[in-house]
Image (cartoon, rainbow, N blue to C red):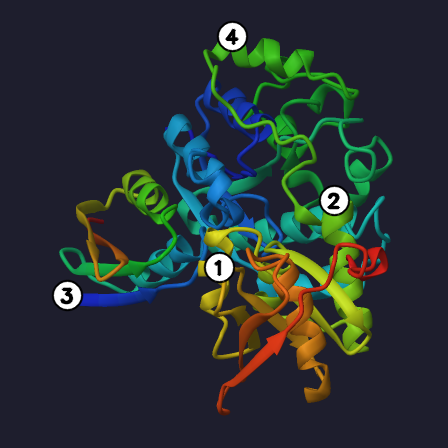
């Protein structure tokens, strides 16, 4: 399943916390697109994902938003 | 087979907690990190806002430390619970609005809860990077037992960097950890930590001068106290504490204050609050976006606008056109004369 998380206007580490809490409820293989506006998320979400064994599939920009796509891995 | 005991470490993102974890890892202890986000953490935040900070490295130090150590990190949002710590600190405040001792007790208590929840996974004790004498309020010989007792951690709280100066804890008494390989650091000197960092090959680590909390900052604390005074209440929301970090704050009247962006980055950030706050911005000249926080009398819009105009490129013009945007109401166009620097009273600056 693919899900979206709106973390716009939040400053780090809130996007990480929101992503962490959302991913707790997802299954292995699920994909989460996290929409952010804080550029710090480009470092922090991938760092959090690496530490916790998840995979960042892509980081991109869409209409001024930063989108970090994470696949749940464990 | 010998039972594997695990520890959870309070990770601030600074050197001391990083070293404390490494000391235990050297003894074969598996560690996971926990980091509490109070809303006042210096970590993150403002680097995303101001233009002058755009080139600063945008990393969360707690996450970075965890990655260097190869440990998992759990970041916990405690913003709501933390209000009680800030508003009613049993042990009082430090030099500013920093309730350091109550804060430490609160965080260790949260770690105790975490250990209870995760005991089935082998977690038995808590470690911190505390050093006796390192901080004037929360890290003193007299306060170390207070933290252990009032947090409920008691003898499962181990401080690897100064353990030899303290009574042995359960992990030491039970032989899970070799006390002889722990340390006896004390005092404000950073030399022992720097030497240990060198031994472990840590060359890049954060060392924030005023600690990791905005509440230790006088300017920030003054703004917080002013916010409460202006509202006649010590309540606050997340947006309030974020906005205290942004812009110049001026209170021309008791009922309201202006939050005036200091650069384009801050103007962009404040844009996000236009639906919640009345805002003012020059339209005839380039100028900052300003928010009005409080109950402003509509008759004061012109005065507020003339202050905001002072900080834009029209500051020397005879007249500046401004737009006043009030949430859910029709916008108002005003023409004002910018105040001179002398007319912006020193007392207004918070």
**Could you give the CA–CA distance between mark 1 and mark 3, rounded to whole angstroms?**
43 Å
Q: Nearer the viewer, residue B50 or B297?
A: B297
- Relative to A39, is B163 on the left or the right? right
Q: In the structure shown, which secondary structural element does the residue marked by tag 2 occupy?
A: helix
Mark 4 crowdedness (10 Å alpha carbons): few <14, some 14-19, many ≥20? few
Q: Position of residue B78 (x, y in %)?
A: 57, 60
On the question of residue B292 being in view, the answer is yes
Q: Which residue is mark 1?
A: B286
Q: Residue at x 49, y 39 (%)?
A: B53
Q: Position of residue B135 (x, y in %)?
A: 77, 32
**Could you give the CA–CA distance between mark 2 and mark 3, rounded to whole angstroms?**
42 Å
Q: Dot 2 falls on which chain?
A: B
**Pointer 2 with pointer 3, Cβ within 8 A:** no
Q: In the structure shown, which secondary structural element does the residue marked by tag 4 occupy?
A: helix
Q: Which residue is mark 2?
A: B216
Marking on residue B199: 4
Q: Dot 3 falls on which chain?
A: A
- The number of numbered discs placed on residues in the rendered structure image is 4
Q: Is residue B35 above or below residue B89?
A: above
Q: Quadrant of the N terminus of chain B?
A: top left
In the rendered image, the residue lying farthest to the bottom is: B329
């Amino acid at each position: 399943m693919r899900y979206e998380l709106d973390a716009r206007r939040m400053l780090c580490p809130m996007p990480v916390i929101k992503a962490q809490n959302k991913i707790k409820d997802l299954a292995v293989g699920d994909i989460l697109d996290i929409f952010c506006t804080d550029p710090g998320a480009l470092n922090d979400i991938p760092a959090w994902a690496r530490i916790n064994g998840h995979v960042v599939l892509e980081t991109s920009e869409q209409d001024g938003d930063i989108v970090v796509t994470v696949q749940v891995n464990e | 087979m010998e039972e594997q005991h695990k520890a959870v470490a309070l990770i601030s993102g600074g050197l001391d907690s990083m070293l404390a974890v490494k000391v235990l890892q050297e003894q074969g202890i598996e560690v996971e990190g926990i980091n509490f986000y109070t809303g006042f953490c210096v970590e993150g935040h403002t680097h995303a806002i101001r233009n002058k900070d755009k080139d600063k490295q945008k990393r969360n130090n707690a996450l970075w430390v965890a990655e260097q150590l190869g440990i998992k990190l759990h970041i916990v949002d405690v913003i709501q619970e933390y209000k009680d710590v800030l508003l009613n600190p049993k042990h009082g405040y430090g030099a500013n609005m920093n309730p350091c001792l109550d804060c430490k007790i609160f965080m260790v208590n949260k770690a105790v809860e975490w250990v209870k929840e995760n005991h089935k996974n082998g977690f038995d004790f808590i470690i911190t990077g505390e050093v006796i004498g390192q901080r004037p309020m929360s890290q003193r010989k007299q306060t170390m037992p207070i933290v252990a007792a009032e947090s409920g951690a008691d003898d499962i709280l181990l401080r690897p960097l100064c353990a030899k100066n303290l009574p042995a804890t359960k992990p030491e008494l039970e032989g899970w950890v070799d006390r002889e390989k722990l340390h006896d650091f004390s005092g404000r000197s950073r030399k022992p930590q720097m030497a240990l960092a060198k031994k472990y090959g840590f060359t890049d680590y954060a060392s924030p001068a005023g600690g990791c909390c905005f509440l230790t900052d006088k300017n920030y604390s003054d703004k917080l106290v002013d916010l409460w005074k202006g509202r006649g209440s010590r309540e606050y929301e997340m947006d309030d504490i974020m906005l205290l970090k942004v812009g110049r704050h001026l209170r021309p009247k008791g009922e309201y204050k202006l939050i005036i962006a200091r650069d384009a980055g801050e103007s962009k950030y404040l844009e996000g609050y236009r639906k919640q706050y009345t805002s003012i911005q020059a339209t005839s000249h380039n100028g900052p976006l300003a928010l009005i926080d409080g109950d402003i009398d509509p008759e004061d819009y012109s005065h507020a606008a003339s202050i905001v105009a002072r900080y834009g490129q029209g500051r020397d013009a005879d007249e500046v056109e401004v737009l006043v945007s009030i949430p859910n109401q029709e916008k108002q166009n005003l023409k004002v004369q910018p105040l001179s620097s002398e007319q912006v009273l020193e007392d207004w600056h918070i």
